[in-house]
Image (cartoon, rainbow, N blue to C red):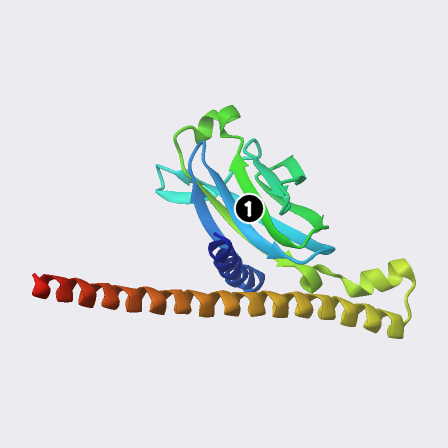
């Protein structure tokens, strides 16, 4: 179980990297909820930008959603505590700061039950997630906190160190899980070969 969870975290990290660079989109139905699991360090700001498009049967294409259609965003930390739960519009931005390192669950679903136009339809959601250093506007931070150039550079280095340490820890854990999975596979193969030889010897003796 622990190996499966860690492997899922590794896959989530890959998805997270893809989000940071390009973003993604997905489709949801009228009552469907879509959730993502993200591995996030502690004390890290996360910013999500999204926009929605509604499937139009006449043009057979996705068109910008009407203002009445919104999205509900809910985020839970590794302990299952709700970090964010809020209703947004058809296009918006949500932010939260992690206080516990580990897997965070980010879920989105539409308010389609109040939107007759969407009933039975399909919604395309464009989502872009930015985590950690990528979310920081350092010139703005320097102006707000009145930091010198040296202090600002130290802040940047600290943020980079925290993310790098978390990344190295995750990679080390994932590598150990990978080798353990390989070892388990080899043990199963050897056990199977031994059992086959034992059964063969048993039937030959009969």
Q: Secondary structure at mark 1?
A: strand
Between 89 and 59, the one lying in front of the other is 89
> Which residue is found at the position 59% from the left and 65% from the top?
170
Crowding at mark 1 (Cα within 10 Å: few <14, some 14-19, many 20+): some
> Which residue is found at the position 68% from the left and 63% from the top?
134
Q: Is residue 45 left or right of residue 59?
A: right
* Image coords of residue 150 (percent x, y): 88, 75
On screen, 41 above or below 55? Answer: below
Q: Is residue 52 left or right of residue 85?
A: left
Location of mark 1 (residue): 51
Between 25 and 68, the one lying in front of the other is 25
> Which residue is found at the position 69% from the left and 51% from the top?
100
- Extreme front residue here? 205
Q: Quadrant of residue 107?
A: top right
Q: Is residue 183 left or right of residue 76?
A: left
Q: Quadrant of residue 86?
A: top right
On screen, 69 above or below 131? Answer: above
* Image coords of residue 23 (percent x, y): 53, 58
On screen, 8 above or below 32? Answer: below
Q: What number of labels is visible?
A: 1
Quadrant in the picture for the C terminus: bottom left
> Which residue is found at the position 45% from the left and 31% from the top?
31
* Image coords of residue 147 (percent x, y): 90, 66
* Image coords of residue 94 (percent x, y): 66, 46
Between 25 and 192, the one lying in front of the other is 192
């Amino acid at each position: 179980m622990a190996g499966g969870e860690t492997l899922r975290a590794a896959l989530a990290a890959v998805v997270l990297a893809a989000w940071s660079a390009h973003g993604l989109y997905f489709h949801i139905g009228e009552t469907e909820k879509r959730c993502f699991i993200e591995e996030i360090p502690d004390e890290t700001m996360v910013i999500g930008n999204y926009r929605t498009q509604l499937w139009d049967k006449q043009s057979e294409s996705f068109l910008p959603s009407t203002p009445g259609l919104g999205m509900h965003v809910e985020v839970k930390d590794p302990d299952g505590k709700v970090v964010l739960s809020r209703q947004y519009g058809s296009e918006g931005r949500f932010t939260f700061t992690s206080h516990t390192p580990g897997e965070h669950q980010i879920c989105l679903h539409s308010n389609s039950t109040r939107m007759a136009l969407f009933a039975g339809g399909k919604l395309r959601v464009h989502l872009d997630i930015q985590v950690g250093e990528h979310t920081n506007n350092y010139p703005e931070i320097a102006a707000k906190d009145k930091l010198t150039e040296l202090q600002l550079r130290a802040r940047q280095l600290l943020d980079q160190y925290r993310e790098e340490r978390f990344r190295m820890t995750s990679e080390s854990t994932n590598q150990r899980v990978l080798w353990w999975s390989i070892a388990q596979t080899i043990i199963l193969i050897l056990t199977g070969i031994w059992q086959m030889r034992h059964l063969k010897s048993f039937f030959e003796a009969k």
